[in-house]
């Protein structure tokens, strides 16, 4: 145990942690130069294209120093705020963390939130100043920021570059000297924490775990604490570039277990793995059921593809247990699924994977969050879809989820960031100057307001210099109203939304205007209306395409022309009663980007 080191890497998106991990793998000889590629630990094409880590990875490296052989377990973490629960479990499986800060960009919002997570778990922090080779690097300034943030001495900060390999040996030395060896009782009953799982189409679900106490042998009967399921450890082993089977894993080891698990719901990230015959007394702290934050309808463009979409969603769920879905139907879009996502990036990635991996063309409806609602009869319910909301006259109150949002930006953009946050019903709760020109702003705001376009607009108003991070802070009662969109008196349920009463009129007007631009003209007049309950709050009219029926009348009596016009008028009236209006997909997408 004394020669094992378990560590993770924490950083903001795009601060170069995947590239630095590549250099560590190269330096320790874990990956041959032939097999090395950009972002070695990232498996998906989307990860490489976007330069982000979506699924966390773990890998074991061997390193020799002063004649002693050390085992280094790197447990990689996703960088984006949507996956913060996975980050917290990866951090809980480690004793140390490499805190990577970009020498050109300085400290950003997620650097701070992930650092707090690491400090809560008593991790040893090794600060690293990355991208020192960039011409725009400001090492002195960023070093001051790191010293202010974690209170370390300046000579503790390691200058490095993932591109050139600068400082890699110093990082490995620091891991061995500063990160403590795992603590635990090798003689105690098995207690291991599951920090990730992946799906293999031949072997079923493979769970990655860290042994905290005791040991696990091949063939043992094991039990998952929170799900209560029991399995036989058909194969256990360590994680190299490929999985390497072993007979036994002991306290402090990081490894995998294959036991023929078929359902992703049986293996939950954060669950405790123990021996069935000799179980441990308690589970590892910090286990949570993953809660979806954002809900949206996903429908196939061609209704016949519904069963194919279901199969695609089930396969995706095996790879990503945080995706939840249930069937729903819509009058406008037919049959589809109501899906729960961890956030907007998670939703984008799932829809992109449906298109790439399964060639499914889908329509995504307006995303919304989940609300608590109480009726006058005292019944309480959770509402994930605005169309499930009871009659307005029967509602006692509605609660919506609030978040604590942290924005770090340059001081020149403070005004425009505050204006944007207040427009989104945010309340400023704190303002701290991290350095002369960097400010950390903390807001309390409704989650529903950041679901649409908040992040994009934040980047616009701050010219790309603001970083954003949030975490849930509970539910609050709000004055919310359900707004429906009607086309010729018919409800389009896919465009229904729960809106704060102060914004309802403006938003209704904007949606009607946008739909007027996007819905093609028909042979009859089309009325687009926004309504709250029975009250119409906005209306736009698409005028009819008029065919010139009197063109064939040249000269003659006016009554002939009038007769033709009356006949046309009667025909249009009849057409309006039986004609249906097709809503193009662009209309559903446009509602998400009303401010463009």
Image (tube, helix red, strand yellow):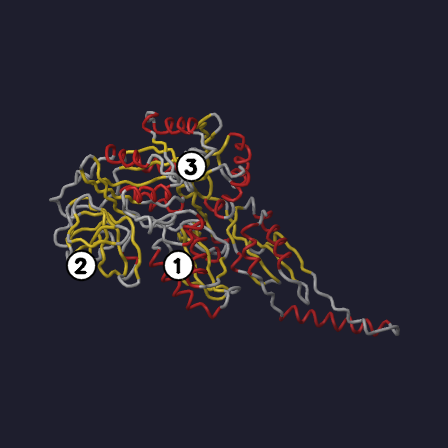
Q: Give the residue number, with chain letter if any, for mark 1.
A: 325
Question: What residue appears at the point 42 percent right and 37 percent down from the top-left corner?
Answer: 109
Between discs 1 and 2, the one toward the N terminus: 2
Q: Tell me where residue 126 sits by quadrant.
A: top left
Look at the numbered disc 3 and give the secondary structure of its residue. helix
Question: What residue appears at the point 40 percent right and 63 percent down from the top-left corner?
Answer: 312
Instruction: Note whether 573 is above or below 251 in the view shown.
Output: below
Residue 375, image x, y percentages:
44, 52
From this viewpoint, is residue 167 visible?
A: yes
Relative to the observer, which residue lies in front, 209 or 44? 44
Left or right position of 526 against 115: right
Residue 463, image x, y percentages:
54, 38
Look at the numbered disc 1 and give the secondary structure of its residue. strand
Q: Distance between the residues labelled 2 and 3?
A: 43 Å
Question: Label 2: how many residues lie within 10 Å, few (<14), some (14-19) or many (20+)?
Answer: some
Q: Distance between the residues labelled 1 and 3?
A: 31 Å
Question: What residue appears at the point 13 percent right and 47 percent down from the top-left corner?
Answer: 189
Residue 533, image x, y percentages:
55, 55
Q: Nearer the viewer, mark 1 or mark 3?
A: 3
Q: Give the residue number, with chain letter if any, for mark 3.
A: 109
Instruction: Note whether 411 is above or below 546 in the view shown.
Output: above
Left or right position of 489 against 456: right
Q: How far apart are marks 1 and 2 (CA)?
A: 30 Å
From this viewpoint, is residue 373 visible?
A: no
Q: Nearer the viewer, mark 1 or mark 2?
A: 2
Q: Give the residue number, with chain letter if any, for mark 2.
A: 232
Give the quadrant of the N terminus: top left
Considering every residue shown, the one lying at the far right of the view is 556
């Amino acid at each position: 145990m004394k020669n094992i080191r378990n560590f993770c890497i924490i950083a903001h998106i795009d601060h170069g942690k995947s590239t630095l991990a590549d250099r560590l793998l190269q330096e320790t000889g874990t990956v041959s130069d032939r097999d090395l590629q950009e972002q070695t630990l990232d498996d998906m094409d989307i990860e490489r294209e976007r330069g982000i880590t979506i699924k966390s990875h773990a890998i074991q490296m061997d390193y020799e120093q002063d004649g002693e052989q050390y085992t280094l377990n790197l447990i990689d973490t996703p960088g984006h705020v949507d996956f913060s629960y996975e980050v917290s479990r990866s951090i809980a499986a480690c004793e140390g963390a490499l805190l990577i800060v970009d020498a050109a960009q300085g400290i950003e919002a997620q650097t701070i939130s992930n650092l707090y997570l690491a400090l809560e778990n008593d991790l040893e922090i090794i600060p690293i100043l990355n991208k020192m080779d960039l011409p725009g690097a400001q090492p002195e300034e960023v070093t001051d920021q790191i010293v202010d943030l974690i209170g370390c001495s300046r000579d503790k900060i390691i200058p490095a570059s993932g591109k050139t390999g600068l400082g890699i040996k110093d990082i490995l030395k620091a891991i061995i000297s500063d990160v403590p060896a795992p603590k635990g009782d090798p003689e105690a009953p098995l207690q291991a924490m599951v920090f990730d799982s992946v799906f293999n189409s031949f072997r079923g679900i493979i769970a990655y775990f860290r042994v905290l106490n005791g040991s696990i042998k091949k063939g043992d009967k094991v039990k998952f604490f929170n799900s209560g399921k029991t399995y036989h450890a058909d194969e256990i082993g360590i994680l190299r570039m490929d999985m390497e089977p072993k007979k036994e894993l002991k306290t402090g080891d990081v490894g995998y277990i294959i036991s023929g698990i078929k359902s992703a719901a049986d293996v939950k990230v954060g669950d405790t793995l123990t021996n069935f015959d000799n179980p441990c007394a308690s589970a590892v702290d910090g286990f949570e059921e993953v809660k979806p934050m954002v809900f949206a309808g996903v429908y196939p463009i061609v209704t016949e593809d519904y069963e194919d979409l279901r199969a695609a969603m089930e396969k995706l769920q095996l790879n990503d247990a945080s995706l939840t879905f249930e069937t729903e139907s819509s009058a406008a879009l037919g049959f589809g699924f109501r899906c729960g996502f961890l956030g907007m990036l998670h939703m984008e990635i799932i829809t992109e994977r449906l298109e790439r991996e399964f060639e499914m063309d889908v329509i995504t409806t307006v995303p919304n969050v989940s609300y608590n609602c109480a009726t006058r009869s005292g019944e309480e319910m959770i509402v994930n879809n605005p169309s499930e909301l009871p009659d307005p006259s029967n509602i006692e109150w509605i609660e919506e989820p609030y978040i604590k949002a942290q924005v770090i930006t340059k001081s020149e953009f403070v005004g425009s960031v505050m204006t944007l946050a207040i427009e989104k019903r945010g309340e400023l709760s704190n303002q701290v100057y991290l350095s002369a020109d960097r400010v950390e702003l903390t807001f309390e705001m409704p989650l529903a307001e950041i679901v649409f376009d908040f992040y994009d607009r934040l980047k616009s108003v701050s010219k790309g210099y603001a970083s954003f991070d949030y975490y849930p802070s509970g539910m609050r009662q709000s004055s919310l109203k359900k707004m429906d969109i009607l086309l010729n008196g018919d409800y389009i349920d896919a465009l229904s939304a729960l809106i704060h009463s102060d914004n309802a009129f403006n938003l209704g007007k904007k949606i009607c205007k946008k739909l007027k631009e996007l819905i093609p003209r028909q042979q009859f007049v089309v009325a687009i209306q926004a309504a709250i309950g029975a009250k119409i709050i906005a209306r736009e009219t698409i005028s009819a395409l008029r065919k010139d029926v009197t063109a064939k009348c040249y000269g003659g009596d006016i009554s002939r022309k009038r007769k033709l016009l009356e006949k046309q008028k009667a025909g249009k009236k009849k057409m309006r009663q039986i004609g249906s209006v097709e809503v193009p997909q662009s209309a559903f997408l446009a509602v998400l980007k009303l401010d463009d």
